[in-house]
Image (cartoon, rainbow, N blue to C red):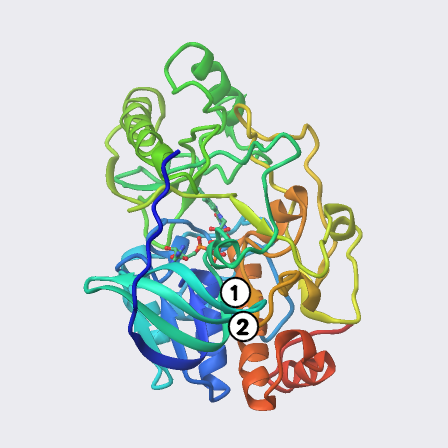
Amino acid sequence: MERVDFVRSVEVKASYDVIVAGSGPAGICAAVAAAREGAKVALVERYGVVGGNLTAGYVGPILGMVGKGTMRDEIVSLLGVPENDMIGVTGKAHDFERAKLLLARFVNHPNIDVYLQTIVVDVVKEGSSITGVVVSGGEGLFILAAGVTIDATGDGAVSYLAGAQTEKGRDDGLMQPVTLEFTISGVDDSRGVICIGDVDDVKLGEERFLDYCKRLSVEGYLPEKIAAVRLHPTTKSGERQVNTTQVNGVDMTRVEEIFAADLELREQIALLTDFFHNHLPGYENCRVISSGTTTGVRETRRVIGDYVITAEELALGCRFEDVIVHRAEFIVDIHNPEGAGQAEEHIQYCKPYDLPYRCFTPKGIENLYVAGRCISGTHRAHASYRVMSICMAMGEAVGVAAAMCRAEECTPRNLDVKKLQNRLTEKGIELYG
Ligand SMILES: Cc1cc2nc3c(=O)[nH]c(=O)nc-3n(C[C@H](O)[C@H](O)[C@H](O)COP(=O)(O)OP(=O)(O)OC[C@H]3O[C@@H](n4cnc5c(N)ncnc54)[C@H](O)[C@@H]3O)c2cc1C
């Protein structure tokens, strides 16, 4: 393949204590937590809206649990969604349009400069230390210099650009399918089922709803590979959040694969609308009112850190001395990378578990944290901690850590984790017990 050496001088536009790349559930919490600790923060987001999957991805309800006192509680209350249980049986999806405003207000802190429609395209390194990020905006490339950078891109993009070790998917490289979520209105709530996912036994007449879906999929009334039509309630009556389209075998870090996947997902929305109108009682008059502006990505890179956590540890409710996220809880939810439904016949439940500090420090790179779904764990472990409640708590802990590194003039690897834990508990975050 032809290569071109590309050398140019790029302006350093500003310097920050902390740069947060990506404004999903992890990134917004990281930025606000660092800012509240007094750090000067840049929040860099490639889309024109903050929130990641919470807004642009149309993903809800906010699932999973973490210990008391984290920013997760603050955001759930800010978005006005009722308290959820661990896997979302009682969960309602939030209002995505309102969330765009509420989360923009949330990050609108005097210590944060928010750069929207700005993508991190490279990093500046001195030895193994990141000293800044190269970004692309409307005026071209520029550099933001930073003491500490937090990679909350979901894809581990900053870590990858910095040369960190990353892994994708399971041993054969296959990743969980991509999905485009959408919202429908006009459902007759007195007759229209709610189905929260593959563990739901809700019935349609005498038949389990999910068996009905499988049957109609075989008969050709539902898109191939759609075995579970997940229909979450939202905070509004007559609405459902539909998490069910899927395309397998897509690597969303490869731009050449994105358009075909997005097109297929949007075609599936049209087929599902026919299914609702013709084959689902209570849904005869529903209509699609909105969908994600971006394909929903469950899985891409995982950054290898100083510790790689496994699903076996999560299942047992592991405890660590360097805990920074406590009582995280969600099932090992692996949407089948090769076909319909779940990848594993029996869903693995997890006892409330800890996430240790070492999962957030990429091996071999200095002045960099990861937070969110790309932290250091195995494919199966990722399938549990990737949910939004847990990502929010991760972001907050790492945001406080990054601010502390600046105040103490140390690197993440040299930070006294006990001091960090003391600060987190002082803020009211449950870390032990
Ligand atoms: C279809 C689907 C359904 C799901 N269902 C649920 C659910 O019901 N409940 C739940 O709790 N979780 C659910 N999840 C999981 C959850 O949404 C994600 O795992 C979670 O949002 C990850 O948070 P994050 O902050 O790590 O990343 P994201 O939410 O992906 O945010 C990452 C942000 O970084 C930005 N970014 C990426 N690269 C760059 C770059 N180079 N420069 C600048 N910005 C960049 C992105 O634009 C994005 O805004 C679902 C996921 C999918 C895909």
Say what amino acid the circle numbered 1 marks. Met
Q: Is residue 1 left or right of residue 353?
A: left
Q: 54 or 299, which lies in front?
A: 299
Mark 1 C-beta closer than 8 Å to ligand 1: no
Q: Is residue 94 left or right of residue 381?
A: left
Instruction: Tell me the element at label 1.
Output: helix
Categorize mark 2 by other alpha carbons within 10 Å: few (<14), some (14-19), many (20+).
Answer: many
Q: 27 or 276, which lies in front?
A: 27
Question: How far from the left and from the top, in percent, is residue 389?
Answer: 54, 60
Q: Is residue 79 left or right of residue 173?
A: left
Question: How far from the left and from the top, in percent, is residue 299?
Answer: 52, 43
**Quadrant into which the C terminus falls:** bottom right
**Quadrant into which the N terminus falls:** top left
Q: Quadrant of residue 297?
A: top left
Picture disc at residue 133: none
Instruction: Tell me the element at label 2.
Output: helix
Badge count? 2
Q: Residue at x 49, y 33 (%)?
A: 177
Question: How far from the left and from the top, in percent, is residue 113?
Answer: 32, 78
Q: Specify whether residue 108 is in view.
A: no
Categorize mark 1 by other alpha carbons within 10 Å: few (<14), some (14-19), many (20+).
Answer: many
Q: Specify whether residue 91 is in view.
A: yes
Say what amino acid the circle numbered 2 marks. Glu
Q: Quadrant of residue 240?
A: top left
Question: How far from the left and from the top, in percent, is residue 138?
Answer: 20, 62
Q: In the rendered view, would you say 111 is above or below 256?
A: below
Picture disc at residue 392: 1
Residues at marks 2 and 1, CA–CA distance in whole angstroms = 6 Å
Q: In the rendered view, would you say 325 is above or below 146?
A: above
Give the residue number, with chain letter if any, for mark 2.
Answer: 396
Q: Look at the numbered discs 2 and 1 and tell me whether their residues touch, using CB distance below 8 Å.
A: yes
Q: Quadrant of residue 173?
A: top right
